[in-house]
Amino acid sequence: MRSILDDVTYSATKAYSYRGGIIDAQTITSLTESSDLDELVTKLKATPYDAAVSRISTPYSARKIEKACYEHISDIHCKLMKTSPGGELLSAYYLKHIARNLKIILKGKALGKSETELEEYVDLYTEELIGRRDLLVKVMTADTLQDAVDSLSGSEFYKDIATALKMYNDNPQINIFDVYIDKAYHTQLVNTYTELDTTSIPMTESISVKLRPIISHYIDSYNVISVLRAKQWNFDTEQIKEILIKPTFDIKHKKLNQMALTDDVETAMKMLESTSFRRFIPTSFDNLADTISMLDSNIKNYEYHKFNKVFVWNAFTELVSLALIRVKEFEAANISTISFGIENNIETKIIQENLTQ
């Protein structure tokens, strides 16, 4: 039986080995210069994405490539959460993949999409890896949106999605499902984090303390963006308070409530000037939706560099597995952006400007 130290060393070594396969900047540039999706897939076969993209059937599409990339990440995620201390947190983080599928299915049901149309976008492979494929199939094959929500009864998403459906029936804004699915996912993440065992070894930090830098960033970012999005979509103050996650970390609950009480998004965003999020505030407020998206983009760019630094400043700790998965997600998102750009004949320069790097 491994000791805690052995587990950390083993899982961190695995994470570092996967990090060695991160696609370098020169290769990313080469991918953006592909003349078509066939050439892009050929180039991807020379990377760690080989096995995943080799499963894609022709004709290729940006959506198929995106799904293959996330299948690749799911494989890595599953392997790491079986060996890492704090693996419960990695398991909770895996719910992010299920959340992504649920958003697609429920919004698709609300828009009257057929099961066949949804199949193109839903990644059941990710669910198969943890034995939850049947649940997603049940949701996807439900006759109505109500039936789809009812089929989630007993799952960690049901309570919040049921609330979202009630709100949607009163005010049919499709983004309501995104809000409440994200709430359900982040609630599971923070609940798992707070339940991590504390160490009884004198003069040592608990796993939860070591993981705080990453979890605090996830929860604070979620709360900040959620308040702003909710104000954009005209949620009332009580509805905004309902979607906030507790416990908060470096952005206090009082500050979030104050943001919720402001008259407009710009005023709420400017309240971040007294917080660590001041570095992410856009310089222009010309377009409401674009301003929030820019704030979100600035946060993600910081996140990308923050998690890359974990491999240097927090070497061989419990942080590296989570950091590796997040960095791979950014990589997959970049490949998705590239494939979408190539498919839609977007200029190479524009594609490159929209990559996280």
Image (tube, rainbow, N blue to C red):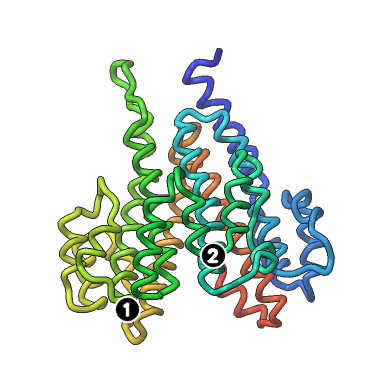
Q: Quick one: SS at disc 1? A: loop
Judge by depth and name the residue closer to the eye, 338 or 192.
Answer: 192
Q: Which residue is mark 2?
A: 144
Residue 251 place in picture, x, y as percent = 24, 54
- Residue 357, visible in the rendered structure: no
Q: Residues within 10 Å of mark 2 (few under 14, many from 20)?
A: some
Q: Which residue is mark 1?
A: 283
Seen at 73% across and 49% down, the residue is 48
Q: As shown in the figure, which amino acid type bears the numbered disc 2?
A: Thr
Tell me the quadrant of the picture where the N terminus can be found.
top right
Indicate whether 212 appears above or below 63: above
Residue 244 place in picture, x, y as percent = 28, 56
Seen at 66% across and 82% down, the residue is 346
Seen at 34% across and 32% down, the residue is 195
Tell me the quadrant of the picture where the C terminus can be found.
bottom right
How many numbered circles are shown? 2
Q: As shown in the figure, which amino acid type bears the numbered disc 1?
A: Thr
Judge by depth and name the residue closer to the eye, 36 or 21.
Answer: 36
Seen at 29% across and 20% down, the residue is 203
The CA span between labels 2 and 1 is 44 Å
Q: Residues within 10 Å of mark 1 (few under 14, many from 20)?
A: few
The image quadrant of residue 179 is bottom left
Is residue 280 left or right of 266 when viewed as pictured? right
- Residue farthest top in this picture: 1
